[in-house]
Image (tube, coloured by chain):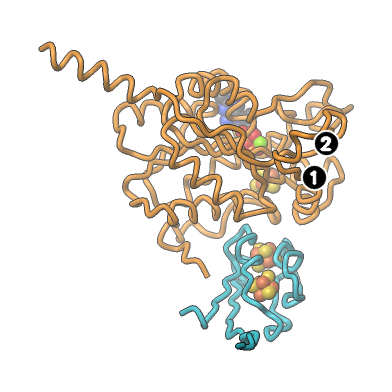
Chain colours: A cyan, B orange
């Protein structure tokens, strides 16, 4: 029997300050509290917790957040 | 990450839409759907009317037509008749398509012309500051309904289905993946295909009705969504205030441009 070890995600999150309108949708969607708001813009607070589920990127209306799952590249 | 850039007119960014407006989520879902189907950019023509939703055509790098209020369907019909090989996608709002453009909407559906219609339903005239629309729920406030809307609303999806559309689905921005899947199916269907996209307008609708910010309205959409399979077993009372999501019809039947082609072919043979 092979034991499945949860792969550690190698991710990079990029937020465009210029395009972010501070709507909080990404923070609301993130299941792992990776993101917070700071001075009206989204910010990465805990990258290590990110599972690259993409929910934030899928639902940011302003194309301001990009999650790069480097294990898939 | 998904690479949206190749489909966008990046120099036009940031988007004009308000913080928390759902329209950007629909735009993203639409782009992913086109990418998933592997459709060439040049074989797409997007046609919009007037309104916040209709501004979408300014941001995408396809053939685009930003037309007049209520007439997206008619311009799109012209494009499809003249260039049947194009994927013609109509971008419109609840006001654009079912108020001023209501007649064009039902007749395009009736003819089952091969258009993919992405109808952004935010229950209001967003662009002009919140006038009542044919989908403003009874009792809700609008600038032209200061004591609450008095009228019964249109069921936009039901209207298309009754008129003769061959694909009809409703999804909401709270589930971008479902929205993308329905849009892809709508594009694949040969005939009039509607995706009614529920999208919050926090500025012109949410604020006046104290519904909170866009994010709160998206949470509400999430809570209110009922899959069609489940809704079929519910009573009208139980469905009050719910948003039924799903594919309501997906059945090909004779399509307008193809029927027209048959006539052309017949006369060319007789010549
Ligand atoms: C002939 C004409 N009448 C009225 C208007 C003003 N007008 C612009 S957008 C709009 C309503 C748009 O509502 P909807 O289609 O729901 O789009 P939304 O802004 O909500 O996305 C109206 C009445 C116009 N531009 N042209
Ligand atoms: S990809 Fe998922 S886990 Fe990572 S920040 Fe976005 S929502 Fe959170
Ligand atoms: S969803 Fe997008 S625009 Fe909204 S706060 Fe997050 S990054 Fe900014
Ligand atoms: S007015 Fe409403 S529909 Fe228009 S951009 Fe603002 S939130 Fe969106
Ligand atoms: Mg509207």
User: Residue B46 location, x and y as percent?
Assistant: 43, 41
User: Residue A45 location, x and y as percent?
Assistant: 73, 82
- Are circles 2 and 1 on residues that touch, CB within 8 Å? yes
Secondary element at image label 2: loop
Crowd rating for badge 1 (residues with CA inside 10 Å; few <14, some 14–19, many 20+)? some
Q: For the point 41% across and 52% down, which residue is it?
A: B37
Residue labelled with disc 2: B241
Report the disc number at residue B224. 1
User: Residue B137 location, x and y as percent?
Assistant: 79, 30
Q: For the point 45% across and 60% down, which residue is it?
A: B11
- Residue B224 quadrant: top right
Q: Is residue B11 left or right of residue A68?
A: left
Please tell me whether residue B84 is drawn above or below residue B61 in the rendered image.
above
Please tell me whether residue B126 is drawn above or below residue B2 in the rendered image.
above
Residue B80 visible, this angle: yes
View quadrant of ligand 2: bottom right
- Residue A20 quadrant: bottom right
Q: How many marks?
A: 2
Residue B49 visible, this angle: no
């Amino acid at each position: 029997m092979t034991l499945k070890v949860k792969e550690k995600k190698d991710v990079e999150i990029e937020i465009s300050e210029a395009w972010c309108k501070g709507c909080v949708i990404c923070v609301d969607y993130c299941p792992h509290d990776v993101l917070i708001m700071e001075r009206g813009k989204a910010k990465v607070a805990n990258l290590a917790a990110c599972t690259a589920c993409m929910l934030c990127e899928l639902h940011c209306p302003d194309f301001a957040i990009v999650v790069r799952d480097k294990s898939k590249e | 990450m998904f690479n949206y850039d190749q489909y966008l007119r990046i120099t036009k960014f940031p988007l004009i839409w308000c913080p928390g407006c759902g329209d950007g989520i629909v735009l993203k879902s639409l782009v992913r759907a086109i990418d998933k189907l592997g459709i060439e950019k040049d074989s797409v023509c997007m046609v919009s009317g007037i309104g916040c939703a209709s501004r979408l055509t300014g941001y995408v790098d396809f053939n685009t037509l930003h037309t007049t209020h209520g007439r997206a369907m008619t311009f799109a019909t012209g494009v499809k008749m003249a260039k049947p090989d194009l994927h013609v996608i109509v971008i419109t709002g609840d006001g654009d398509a079912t108020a001023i453009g209501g007649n064009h909407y039902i007749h395009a559906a009736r003819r089952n012309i091969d258009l993919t219609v992405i109808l952004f339903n935010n229950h209001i005239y967003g662009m002009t500051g919140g006038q009542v629309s044919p989908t403003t729920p009874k009792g809700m406030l609008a600038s032209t309904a200061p004591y609450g809307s008095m009228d019964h609303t249109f069921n936009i999806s039901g209207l298309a289905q009754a008129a003769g559309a061959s694909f009809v689905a409703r999804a909401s921005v709270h589930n971008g993946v479902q929205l993308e899947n329905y849009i892809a199916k709508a594009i694949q269907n040969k005939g009039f295909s509607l995706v009614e996209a529920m999208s919050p307008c926090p500025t012109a609708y949410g604020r006046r009705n104290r519904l909170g910010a866009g994010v709160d309205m998206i949470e509400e959409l999430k809570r209110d969504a009922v899959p069609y399979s489940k809704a079929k077993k519910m009573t009208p009372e139980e469905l009050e205030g719910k948003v039924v999501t799903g594919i309501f019809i997906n059945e090909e039947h004779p399509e307008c441009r193809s029927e027209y082609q048959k006539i052309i072919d017949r006369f060319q043979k007789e010549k």
